[in-house]
Image: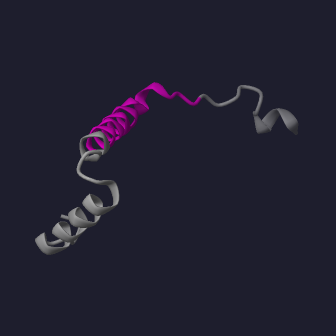
Amino acid sequence: MFGFGMPELIIILVIVLVVFGAGRLPEIGGALGKSIRNFKRASDGKDEIVIKPKKDSDPKKEE
């Protein structure tokens, strides 16, 4: 997983615990989950964007 082994993940978890504290971890996890969910929704909604060419930009009319 992203080149991280178990020792690296444990070190990162310990650092997060020290910085944020055990009480705020559920809040941070919830916010991270919502962010990932919103990102997935946004990336799945790319069919909603429609780009139409301008009708006035015909190069033959300018000559």
Query: Of helix, strand and loop, which mostly describes the magenta segment?
Result: helix
Percent of width and height locating residue 3: 21, 72
Q: Any magenta on residue 9?
A: no
- Which residue is located at x 11 percent, y 70 percent? 6
**Quarter of the figure with the C terminus:** top right
Residue lying farthest right?
Answer: 63
Residue 24: give x, y in percent of width and height.
29, 45
Question: Residue 29 is drawn in which quadrant?
Answer: top left
Which residue is located at x 64 percent, y 31 percent? 53
The quarter of the picture where residue 54 lies is top right
Percent position of residue 45, x then y: 39, 29
Q: Residue furthest left?
A: 6
Image-based side of 46 in relation to 4, left or right: right
Q: Which stretch appears magenta?
A: 29-51
Which residue shows up at 83% across the image and 32% down it?
61
How many callouts does the rendering have? 0
**11 to 26, vertically: above or below:** below
